[in-house]
Image: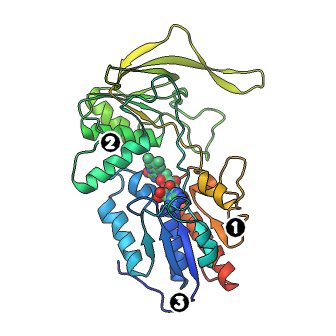
Amino acid sequence: MVPEAPKVRTGKKVAVIGSGPAGLAAAAQLNLAGHTVTVFERADRPGGLLMYGIPNMKLDKQEVVLRRIKLMEKEGIKFICNANVGDNVEPQIFLKEYDATVICTGATQPRDLPIEGRNLKGVHFAMEFLTANTKAVLAGASSPINAAGKDVVVIGGGDTGTDCVGTSMRHGCKSLVQIEILPKPPMERAADNPWPEWPKVYKMDYGQEEAAAKFGADPRIYLTTVKKFVGDEAGNVKELVTVEIKWEKNDKGQFIPKEQPGTEKTRPAQLVLLAMGFLGPEQALLKEINVETDARSNIKAEHGAFTTSIPGVFAAGDCRRGQSLVVWAINEGRGAARECDRFLMGATDLP
Ligand SMILES: Cc1cc2nc3c(=O)[nH]c(=O)nc-3n(C[C@H](O)[C@H](O)[C@H](O)COP(=O)(O)OP(=O)(O)OC[C@H]3O[C@@H](n4cnc5c(N)ncnc54)[C@H](O)[C@@H]3O)c2cc1C
């Protein structure tokens, strides 16, 4: 791969806020179109969840992510890290100093579990654990949040939970349990889930396969939630109490989890990782610039147009559609770049 800088510059300045796959895709395309692109990233390295979410064993940071960012820098894109827009960077500069802005800040607001003992040491959001781990991998050091020799409980049975399982296995955890509030999926497609829909069937991902190979069984337990965390005298989590649940309809016809009395179990846990999904984009910046949001608190912008309620400001990726996938973020970043180029030049050749 060699850098391909544009031959002609338009003289237009574009700011991209956030350097995940949406921001990187938008920046690459806008640079290709000849605009001068600056990417603002609040973390110490660019890449978003490509850098600090998806673990190194799934996506190599040096060989893939940083190599691509270096190529982009050589193509003329400027990355400013430790630049938290709305905190240490004044958001109004975009409206004053740039001809257009693309917001790609992701959907990074984690779902919390505000139960007794939540503040004990050793109870962390998944992203705190995964970020600390990747920083340590890149520094060739041991992670400050470490699963080595510990009984680990991961709360949440999704992909983020799986990455916590895989990372804990690599640290050398003593035991591992992954708690899922939903029922175990069927082994074969249900009647209301025909082809070509995505098959909602039981599967083991890499983390569960690794845990099963070491500990003898899939670490997931279903239809279960956590009632409280219990600490020792030093304020460290030492165990947690789980309870089985049943999904029942309430008087509005909505399914709600109902705890089953007498099913409480106390389990050892010196490291608890909360991986219960994300609630949408962080709101502080969106409120400060007064951009319109939708009913799910994402930035309001049509897919295809990507224009927000502020002229010249576009939105792409998880901050527009909610937590999703890298391919969608790239699709949206490229689409927002196309519409941004059209806004700046009156026409566009970008795909
Ligand atoms: C643990 C985990 C594993 C995943 N694994 C996969 C996978 O294997 N495959 C897959 O397809 N998808 C995966 N996903 C989902 C995928 O990573 C996201 O859908 C994708 O990264 C979204 O891209 P984005 O650019 O919209 O946002 P993000 O990647 O979230 O990037 C947003 C960036 O904006 C920055 N930012 C936020 N606010 C500000 C601000 N005010 N100022 C400056 N910068 C700011 C953030 O620091 C971040 O770097 C995973 C997600 C997680 C959490």
Task: Name the mark on residue 198.
Answer: none
Q: Secondary structure at mark 2?
A: helix
- In the shown orientation, is residue 26 left or right of residue 76? right
Q: Is residue 343 above or below residue 59?
A: below
Does residue 6 show up?
yes
Identify which residue, 68 or 282, lies in the foreground.
282
Of marks 3 and 2, the one in the foreground: 3
Q: Amino acid at mark 2?
A: Thr
Quadrant showing the N terminus = bottom left
Task: Name the mark on residue 9.
Answer: 3
First in residue order: circle 2 vs circle 1: 2
Q: Is residue 221 above or below residue 202?
A: above
- In the shown orientation, is residue 236 left or right of residue 139? right
Q: Amino acid at mark 3?
A: Arg
- Label 3 environment density (alpha carbons within 10 Å; few <14, some 14–19, many ≥20): few
Percent across and percent down for residue 137 are 27, 52
Q: Which residue is mark 1?
A: 307
CA gap, disc 2 to disc 1?
38 Å
Q: Which residue is mark 2?
A: 167
